[in-house]
Amino acid sequence: MAPSAESHELPYADGDFFAFEQLLSGKEQDRLAEVRDFLAREVKPVAADCWNRGEFPMDLVPKFAGLDLVSPVRRQGYSNLFAGMLHAEVTRADASIATFLGVHDGLFTGSIELLASQEQKDEWLPDIYALKKIGAFGLTEPLGGSDVAGGTRTTARRDGDSWILNGAKRWIGNATFSDWVVVYARDVADNQVKGFMVDTSLAGFSATKIENKISLRTVQNADIVLEDVAVPDHFKLANANSFRDVNKVLKATRLSVAWQAVGLQLAAFDVARRYAVERHQFGRPLASFQLIQDQLVRILGNTVSSMGMMVRLSQLEDEGIAKDEQSALAKAFATARMRDSVALGRSILGGNGIVTDYEMAKIFADAEAIYSYEGTAEINTLVTGRAITGISAIV
């Protein structure tokens, strides 16, 4: 359903009720508008069809390369606030595409930027930034999710000038078509988790698409198996030598996932508000009923409160003083509000809310993945609880 002309005339139709976007510099606002136009032109028209078929639109990769979105903060000098709003905007268009970029940019590229040597960065990053090489991030395992810090079962054994990797990874986004995967494995010599840049063409590496998903269907999640994969020592990330190092990457990406929760709420507001204005029941616009206005305002309130928290957290990140527990609270809070928002949006659409023709069903389903990945609500709650009590409740 295309937005009506009327939707552009209302001052609050874009969901940014408190004008947070005005906190960006003029250059950043222009850049965000450029990306928004690109998403409306290239992503939105194909998003539902790709989701329905469970296929990734590979033809979009060179177009995203031309848009030059990878590493806006460390490489291009934009603020974390801009990067967050950018990620929210991509999610607003399609959460699966946002996840693709989040994996390649935040998790994979972030691992290289934060944990590789300068020599490794100089060799690898140009092709990564240009999307000539697509990456994935291999941490979660079939038997290790929230407890992967202490429960990593994939092993790495030094053998001369190589490392021999054995094990399995699960839910690895982009892995069916990526060129490289950063794999985190436990060194059998010192029991520490270390990072390795693994070429997906190496013997012993296999990736199988996970089928039958109800969320983020466009994302090509895979089960990875590593059987005696020999990785040259130069491809061990120089500064990835313990799980503390991995956490440097996860802290930054948890911020972007919380922004995804904002973006999905903006998407829910867009669809629900437009539907309520255009749909007629009992001879009147749906939006003329008090209960519908109440639901729309609740979605808006959830969105604005989530965005306000994320704006402040991004500012703290720009100042270099953001803390892990603050990211944890933001991810837990924003995704909980998101769950409520998409449920309200689905309710407003009634029966049309369960088919992807009207967008809301896809938004509703995608929220479930965002609620769980990059740290579940329960784990992030306990991280925050530990910070405010000084007592760990994580077993």
Image (cartoon, grey):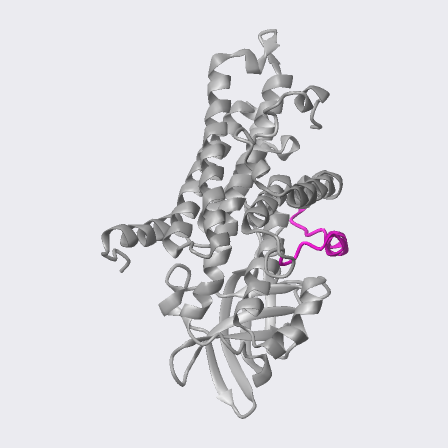
Left or right: residue 239 compared with residue 391:
right
Image quadrant containing the N terminus:
top right
From which residue to which does the magenta span run?
A: 53-71
Q: Residue 162 location in percent, x, y? A: 56, 87
Say if residue 78 shows up in the picture.
Answer: yes
Q: Nearer the viewer, residue 131 or 320?
A: 320
Image quadrant containing the C terminus:
bottom left
Q: Nearer the viewer, residue 40 or 227?
A: 40
Q: Residue 338 location in percent, x, y? A: 47, 37
Residue 55 counted in the magenta span: yes
Name which residue lies at 60% across and 71% down.
Answer: 206
Residue 160 position by quadrant: bottom right
Name which residue lies at 40% across and 42% down.
Answer: 333
**Number of marks drawn:** 0
Name which residue lies at 54% across and 36% down.
Answer: 20
Residue 345 versus residue 107 in the image, above or below: above
Residue 97 versus residue 165 in the image, above or below: above
Say if residue 141 shows up in the picture.
Answer: no
Residue 241 versus residue 342 in the image, above or below: below
Most extreme residue toward the bottom is: 160
Left or right: residue 130 compared with residue 206:
right
Residue 80 counted in the magenta span: no
Q: Residue 241 location in percent, x, y? A: 45, 76
Most extreme residue toward the top is: 283
Q: Residue 250 location in percent, x, y? A: 47, 60
Residue 318 versus residue 185 in the image, above or below: above
